[in-house]
Every structure is written in structure tokens, then in C-alpha cells.
Image (spheres, rainbow, N blue to C red):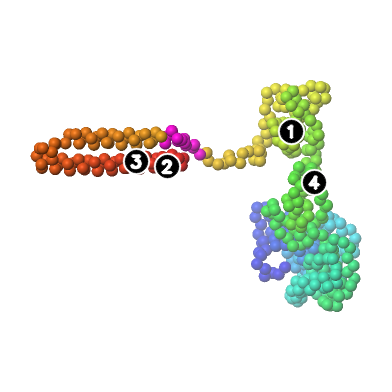
Amino acid sequence: MEKDKEHEIMTGGSRGLSKKGVGRQDRQLNTYDWLADVPGNAESTDLVEVQFKHTRKGYYHNVNNLPLKKGDIVAVEASPGHDIGVVTLTGRLAKMQMKKANIRSADDIKRIYRLARPIDMDKYREAKAREHETMIESRQIAKDLGLQMKIGDVEYQGDCNKAIFYYIADERVDFRQLIKVLADTFHVRIEMKQIGARQEAGRIGGTGPCGRELCCATWMKNFISVSTNAARFQDISLNPQKLAGMCAKLKCCLNYEVDSYIEAGKKLPSKEVVLQTQDNDYYLFKSDIMAGMITYSTDKRIAANLETISAARAKDIIEMNRRGEKPLTLQGEGKVETNVNGTVDLLQGDISRFDKAKKKKKKQGGNGHKNNQNEVTQQAQQNENASNANNANATPPSENAGQSGVSNNQNRQHKHKNKRNNHRQHKNGQQQNNNAQEQ
């Protein structure tokens, strides 16, 4: 509400937005005045929508014909004194919003005094600085009095003459003694206002599981009760962790599409009907309400021989069963039902379908091991035969001694060389066997 805030005020319009209809975007229940640039809109009515702390809004008469626009900080009539708020709507949209808020009595609509002056803003800042400390102290007072209630927020009036205490309680609470203690402690007029868990979530704000800002903090004002029947109509699993919102109550968005699901569900056959064919009896397994597709199983409890058909085909089979006829299959005369919307149910697929296919290597068993040993044995035998042949061709000892010495040296070299070859081949054979066993 201060003019020196970090948030910029939109002064220009782009993509069809009017600069007069766009204000600060840092407040709950922010609205876009799409009639702000229409000539004569502001003069059509003197009603003005003014927003205070969090989600509290009020409607006032602009009796002094002030040139108000969205984002102006004004001083309005209060009981007692005056309050400080921000203009959020003017003209015809303010009148429509007042009807939506069910404000019919003329006494509920007070006046706008003036644009806020510096002295008003100083008093307003002083009041806001006391709110958090007052809330903490009031919680301790309520606890000392033994009251089963939670004080969720405190809002001071702009002139510090009044304070509103917002509280949550499951049962009726007698807080007459609490009001006396609070008035003596803080020296202001006390007003107690009970709110629900949804209103508290709207006042605090936050982000929902959908990734968007909470509906109760952006546009929703009137809260309609939500029951688990809304989840049943939409075939949503009754999981409390999934159905509960930030307020720990059932999500308000469960009511958004329930009417469409009820209308689409009327076109589907009853869940208790059993489809009879010449091969088997089929029981309803699951249904896609909006697509009009039904999946049947041959077993009541588990998924067995699943067949997906359209609602129209299921009704045709039911009519045939009533006449005492049984079709050959659920699909009809050799027809295979396909998903009309082209959607794929990922839950029905194999979870290993994204894994890379690995090439299977042939494992060598005991035969491979024996073959390797035979090859090593044959190679050693060949080397031994070659060594014997060299020894047979050697010069007899009776001949020249020098030649005999050379021949003996050559024989020894051949023997050492053959031993090294045999050892190397034997080692290679063992390594191949080990690799084959590991595979």
C-alpha cells in the first residue's frame, strides 16, 4: 500500500491490457478492471471497491466525486473512526461485485472520505507494526484462559482505534472474558471474527499442488462445501493425501468439473451389469467417463483378459443379453476397438519398455572348457614332437667337437623356446576359460 514499494505499478498496456485496469499485482483477490478504459464507466455509479489486509474487501460511496482509479490509497468511513484501504474496482464492475457479495442493505455501504494524506499513512504504518506482536500475545492470553481456539491473524484499523481478531474453532467458544482481557491489555476496541480453514488459507496465500496460486487467494470469495461424492463421480482414488488441499480440507477444485462428469456418466451402463458372450462373462474393471470407453475383465477381482469397448457397444451387448443372445466376442465381428482420442494409458504398459535392449551373449559351458584344454594339449604335443625331431637331426658326438658344441647349444635354445611357448599358450588357455565362465 505504500508508494515506495518494490512492486511496480503498471503504467502502460500491452497485449490488449488497459493501463487503467491494471494495478499492483502483490495482493490477494487481485482483479483486472476490463471496463476501466470505457468512456463513462466511472461516472455510471459512485460505488467503489476497496481492499484492506489480505482478502477483506468493502464497498463505499464516492460521495465527494473524487477522481479515483485503481491503486489509489483512500481513507474510508469506519465504526468508529476511519480506515485505510486501496481502490481495486470502480464503475460498473464494482456494482456487479457488490451483488456477488450479497450486500443489499444500504447501511452496509459507507463513504469514502478522501485520498490518504501523509499523516494518515504514518498512523497506518504504526498500526500495522503492532499486529504481529498483538497476535502472539493474544494467543498466550487465550491459552491461559483455557479456550479451545486458535487466533490466526490480527488486523488493526487504520487509525488504531479498533482491532479485528480472526480465530478458528471447531466448537462454539465463549470469549466474553477474552474480550475484556484483550481490551484491557491493548486499549482498543475488540472485534472477534470466526473464519474457517479455507478462509485462513486464502488470507495466508500459497501455491497449490497444480503449481498455480491458491484459488482462495486469487479469485474465490464464496466457499461451497465439498464432499467425497465429487471424487467418486470423477473416479478419483479416495486418497486423503491427494484430495486434501493446503487447508487440510478437500480441494475446492473437486467441484469444478463434477457436473460434467455426472452428465457424461449418465451415458455409461451400470457398473453391476455383467456382459455375457459365448466365450466368457465380463465384469466392469474401469471406465474412462469423458472418453466413453469401458474396460471389462473376465475376473471380478483382478485384471484378466481385459477388453476395452465403447459405451454404445456395451449397451448393444446388454440389449442382446436381454433377448437371450450372446455375441461371439465383445469387440464384434472381428473388429478391434481403438482409443478414439488416441490417448495411451501409461499404467497399462510395461515399465521396462524404456530400458535399452541388451544383446545376449552365448555362454560357453563345460564343453567349451574341455575344447580349450584339448587345443592346449594338442599344441604342446606338436611342440614336443618338433623338439624330438630337432634332437634326432643333431650331429653325433663322434664328429667334430666344435660342431657338436654348437648343435648342443642350438638344442638347448630350442628346448627353452618350446617351454616358453608352451607356458604362454597354457596361460592364454586358462584366461579364455576364466572369461567363458564369467560370461
Disc 4 to disc 2, how far (Cα)?
Answer: 65 Å
First in residue order: circle 2 vs circle 1: 1
Image height check: is 366 above or below 46? above
The label shown at residue 299 is 1
Q: Amino acid at mark 1?
A: Asp
What is the crowding at mark 3: few (fewer than 14 residues within 10 Å), some, or many (at least 20)?
A: some
Q: What secondary structure is found at the residue carrying circle 3?
A: helix
| Residue at image location 30% in from the left, 34% down from the top | 381
The label shown at residue 230 is 4
Q: Which residue is mark 3?
A: 426
Image height check: is 40 above or below 332? below
- Find out whether the residues at labels 3 and 1 contact each other: C-beta distance under 8 Å: no
Q: What secondary structure is found at the residue carrying circle 4?
A: helix
First in residue order: circle 3 vs circle 1: 1
Residue depth check, mark 4 versus mark 3: number of the one nearer the observer: 3
The label shown at residue 434 is 2
Image height check: is 143 above or below 198? below
Q: Residue 141 occupies which quadrant of the picture?
A: bottom right
Disc 3 to disc 1, how far (Cα)?
Answer: 63 Å
Disc 1 to disc 4, how far (Cα)?
Answer: 28 Å
First in residue order: circle 1 vs circle 4: 4
Residue toward you, 259 or 397: 397
First in residue order: circle 4 vs circle 3: 4
Q: Residue 416 location in percent, x, y?
A: 24, 43
Q: What secondary structure is found at the residue carrying circle 1?
A: loop
Q: Which residues are magenta?
A: 358-369
Q: Which quadrant: the N terminus? A: bottom right
Q: Amino acid at mark 3?
A: His
